[in-house]
Image: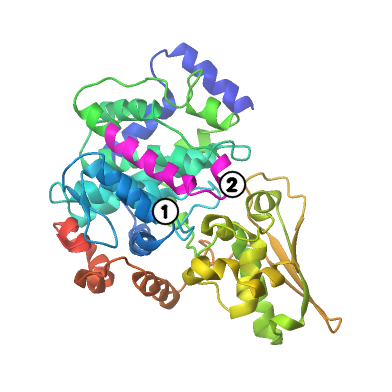
Amino acid sequence: MAARVASAAANRHHPGMTDAAQAFATHVAATRFHHLPAAVVERAKVFLLDTLGVGIAGSTAQGAAETLVAARQWGAGAQASVLGGSARLPAAQAVLVNAFQIHCQEYDCLHEGAVLHALATLLPVLLAEAQRRPISGPALLTALAVGVDVSCGLGLAAKQGMRFFRPATSGGFGAVAGLASLRGYSAAQTLAAFGLHYGQVSGTMQAHVEGSPVLPLQVGVNARAAWQACDLAEAGLPGLAEVFEGRFGYLPLYEAEWDLAPILAGLGRRWLVAELSHKPFPSGRATHGGVEGVMALRAAHGFHAEEVAEVVVQGPPLILRLVNRPLPAAPSANWARLCMPFVLAKLLQHGVVDLAQFRGAALVDPVTHALAGRIRMVDDGNPDPNALAPQRVQVRLRDGRVLEHAMAEMLAAPTRPLDEARHLAKFQRCLEFAAQPAPWHGGLVQAVADIEAATDVGAALLGG
């Protein structure tokens, strides 16, 4: 709390400007590709490919068709492509639809400490810009890096659990940063865009509680707002000045308790895109410890679903808050992805957790629902409101055996990265769910691998 009060006091001494807003804007304006270490570039490429894949798969997910139908009514134009199909829309509308598709299946990468899916808001605005004019691969990767620094930096600064849906709220500021980088904005222009974006920020956790498609829609709305904010700043409209730490600024209003000092001190040295985690399974990240634990125990002991009497997942309060929910008779896909009993029941039933299990008749399968009744969660009392680990999984078998698996960090966290084979297998599986498979999809793996040499990433990644 002391850090928050100190920041507020600093604002009073410097009216019209905040240290945080200026520091972020300067970082965005000053960063060039040669500042990025090689290891950071490689991780950025990994998550670029991964995000393209989940966005393509999202084109056939629940809510995607309706979102596209609505977006077609909001203006004529064919400036930018919608992932996974042949549709083209005005740029701002394509940004919204693509952001929805990226996040709508809970399969997109995230920063665990920030509890934030940074690329869901960020990549759609960069792709839309890359279809307005030629953008080089190095410029795209630089924009990815600074965008993640801003959005995840705001998330990491938070010192209490989420009050609002951070992938939408903080994520939108990251999208502003990335687009400002691509457009070559000065620090002053970037600052104005932050201020114009703040007037549009939204994102309620009620959508998460209800398992509603409003959750990914909020990501889309904030991505579109970022595009609009940059256009307005470029046109010369002034924005709010005390964006992050003002009396009613983003951090006091949305996060309440924060400490930005270590984040700002690390700008240009700590690259947060290298700290992102894969999502190896198409469900809420908070379910992944349970999935990994059951998979590990089944591999070691070879039990079948009918042998299981009970599964208990013990972990921090955050995972219970996010995925400890009852399973209704006819859950929506969004609800099921965020329901630990449903996800682990599918795993016990089929041995895998797959995109197809959250669609159609699979949602009401009576075998799944019966198995879900054997799964429960326990709070381990962890005092960190943003912690997703450690976790412990216990499987009690009908013959009396009790099996346990503990993990300090989940699979695909930065210290346990997903290997290349699994990364590429996930991407290829995502392509199978495209609404309209395109010839250029098959070349995306190589296009991303060679992205540093690209002079027109719109053509390389979107077929033109």
Question: Residues in magenta?
Answer: 205-228
Q: Residue at x 26, y 69 (%)?
A: 444
Name the disc covering residue 63, or none.
1
Q: Position of residue 43 (x, y in %)?
A: 38, 61
Q: Residue at x 39, y 19 (%)?
A: 17
Would you call the spot at circle 2 few (<14 residues within 10 Å), some (14-19), or many (20 or more)?
some
Position of the N terminus by quadrant: top right
Mark 2, secondary structure of its residue: helix
Q: Is residue 211 magenta?
A: yes
Main secondary structure type of the part rendered in magenta:
helix
Q: Position of residue 103 (x, y in %)?
A: 43, 53
Describe residue 3's horizontal placement relative to residue 377 as left or right: left
- Residue 143 can be seen, yes or no: no
Question: Residue 64 appears in which quarter of the rendering?
Answer: bottom left
Q: Is residue 415 magenta?
A: no
- Residue 308 can be seen, yes or no: yes
Q: Amino acid at mark 2?
A: Glu
Alpha carbons under labels 2 and 1: distance apart: 15 Å
Q: Position of residue 314 (x, y in %)?
A: 74, 60
Q: Which residue is mark 2?
A: 210
Front residue of 358/393: it is 358
Extreme residue toward the bottom, this view: 302
